[in-house]
């Protein structure tokens, strides 16, 4: 408590969380009102499942909270015992290591800093995968001996040597008797409270989970202005080296860090996107697309969804009709059977206050799969002496129809025989209908009905047969 207040004496409030379980305490931190924007954790413990509390830490990151965990005071991390790493090796918290700070004078400016001999750190013994921000080029090197597959820590550091003035348990205060990363973590929480103060004055959201930001900045030339790079000292299996290391992380904050964090923090806003740039729908059917909002700068307001550009007969709905912060909504699209085939550009609009973002989806309405048949002639004359004639039966298709169409004929007299070659057509094609009449056939006309059938769908064409001598 004294370290956080000493770093940020103008804090509006300071809350201590006490509970019967880690889930109860961490969970309460994500729902308490007012929401604590910076949290310092000086404890370490062995969880049953190192990933069980991830939803809470991820929620903190999503709603602009910064969680700083002491990296421990027993050198190189182990899965259990006094050197246990958790929660400092969790990928959603900022792990704070220790340094030995020297100032130019009592309460004077920074003079030098070395790695604290007991600073906790190393490679995650809980098997936590390396996060994306530690995979940036220049973070893990042969010098720092970090892992390219597992989480490395700590991320940052602050003074942890036995140089603190401590008042506790309603007893006399002591000087230079206590130390550890348990002091460094709340100091970082207080420091980021100062950052948040400037962000609030600029109308911006809190800094939140700072790891992605500081790692990206520290692999550039801005590193020297933002952090004191600790390059000497050893703790356990690792040593402080130039740049990131597994004893002090990136080091302690330098004068430029507040400006860097306040400049890099975006104003609360959101982006809108659709899961598909185009959706194809058959006349009389429906389709859907997922609309997603991505929040930036801690945005957590309601985004109302609407759409324009749809033709008459196309009905669109959203479920839900609005999204709070980051989330998704299903856009359902229904096309009546009367909608003209073609492509239509829909503009999806997300509105939150005066902020409007758009995304487009092209809806292509197609005709349903189907077919028709036709004869190349409407009438044919066959003499009893010649005995036969031929008619071409063709099929045309729509909507990508490609099924078999079985052909048959009706209406012929008993002395007339009809056959098809082939007997069926797959999709679009042609079959030859042969009509044979006997020498004793009656003279006159017959109306022949040719039927094409596929499944339960059938279509017909007619041919008039005239039998002559």
Image: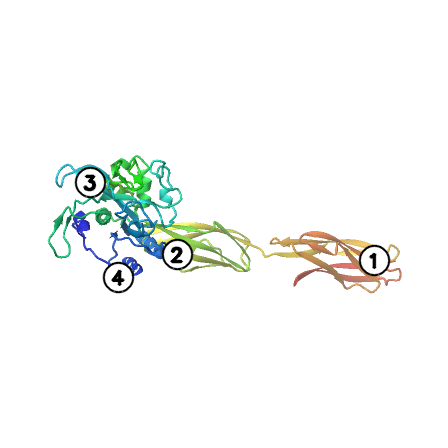
Q: Which mark is residue 169?
A: none
- Give the mark nearest the N terminus, 3 or 2: 3
In space, the residues marked 2 and 1 are separated at their CA atoms by: 67 Å
Q: Is there CB contact under 8 Å for labels 3 and 4?
A: no
Q: Is residue 309 left or right of residue 433?
A: left
Which of the two residues, 253 or 275, is positioned nearer the viewer here? 253
Q: Tell me how the rendering is colored.
A: rainbow
- Element class at badge 3: strand
Taking depth in this image into account, of 161 and 331 the one nearest to the observer is 161
| Mark 4 or mark 2, whichever is nearer to me | 4
Can residue 48 be seen here?
Answer: yes
Going from the N terminus, do you reach mark 1 or mark 3 first?
A: 3
Q: Position of residue 33 (x, y in %)?
A: 25, 59
From the image, state whether disc 1 or disc 3 is nearer to you.
3
Q: How far apart, in angstroms, are the residues tagged by discs 4 and 1?
A: 96 Å
Residue 205 visible, this orientation: no
Q: Nearer the viewer, mark 3 or mark 2?
A: 3
**Does residue 424 appear to the left or right of 104 in the view shown?**
right
Q: Earlier in the sequence, mark 4 or mark 2?
A: 4
């Amino acid at each position: 408590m004294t370290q956080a207040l000493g770093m940020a004496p103008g804090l509006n409030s300071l809350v201590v969380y006490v509970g019967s379980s880690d889930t109860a305490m961490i969970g309460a931190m994500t729902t308490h009102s007012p929401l604590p924007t910076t949290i310092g954790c000086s404890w370490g413990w062995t969880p049953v499942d190192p990933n069980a509390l991830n939803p809470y830490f991820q929620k903190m990151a999503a709603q602009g909270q910064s969680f700083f965990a002491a990296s421990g005071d027993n050198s190189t991390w182990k899965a259990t015992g006094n050197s246990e790493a958790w929660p400092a090796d969790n990928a959603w918290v900022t792990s704070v290591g220790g340094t030995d700070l020297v100032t130019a004078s009592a309460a004077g400016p920074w003079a030098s800093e070395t790695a604290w001999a007991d600073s906790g750190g190393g490679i995650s013994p809980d098997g936590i995968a390396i996060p994306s921000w530690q995979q940036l080029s220049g973070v893990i090197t042969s010098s720092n001996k970090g892992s390219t597959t597992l989480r490395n820590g700590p991320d940052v550091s602050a003074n942890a040597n036995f140089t603190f003035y401590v008042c506790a348990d309603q007893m006399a205060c002591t000087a230079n008797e206590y130390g550890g990363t348990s002091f460094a973590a709340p100091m970082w929480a207080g420091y980021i409270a100062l950052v948040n103060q400037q962000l609030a004055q600029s109308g911006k959201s809190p800094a939140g989970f700072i790891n992605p930001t500081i790692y990206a900045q520290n692999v550039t030339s801005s590193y020297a202005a933002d952090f004191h790079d600790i390059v000497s000292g050893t703790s356990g299996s690792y040593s402080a080296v130039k740049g990131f290391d597994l004893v002090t992380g990136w080091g302690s904050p330098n004068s430029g860090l507040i400006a860097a964090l306040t400049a890099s923090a975006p104003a609360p806003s959101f982006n809108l996107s659709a899961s598909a740039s185009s959706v194809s729908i058959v006349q009389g059917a429906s389709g859907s697309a997922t609309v997603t909002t991505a929040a930036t700068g801690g945005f957590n307001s309601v985004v109302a969804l609407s759409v324009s550009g749809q033709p008459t007969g196309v009905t669109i709905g959203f479920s839900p009709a609005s999204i709070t912060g980051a989330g998704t909504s299903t856009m359902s699209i229904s096309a009546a059977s009367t909608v003209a085939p073609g492509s239509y550009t829909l503009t999806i609009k997300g509105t939150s206050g005066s902020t409007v973002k758009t995304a487009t989806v092209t809806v292509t309405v197609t005709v349903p799969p189907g077919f028709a048949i036709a004869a190349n002639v409407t009438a044919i004359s066959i003499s009893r002496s010649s005995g036969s004639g031929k008619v071409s039966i063709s099929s045309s298709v729509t909507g990508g129809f490609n099924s078999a169409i079985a052909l048959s004929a009706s209406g012929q007299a008993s002395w007339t025989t009809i056959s098809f070659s082939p007997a069926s057509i797959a999709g679009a094609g042609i079959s030859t209908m042969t009509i044979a009449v006997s020498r004793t056939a009656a003279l006159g006309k017959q109306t022949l009905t040719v039927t094409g059938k596929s499944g339960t769908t059938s279509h017909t064409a007619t041919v008039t047969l005239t039998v002559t001598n």
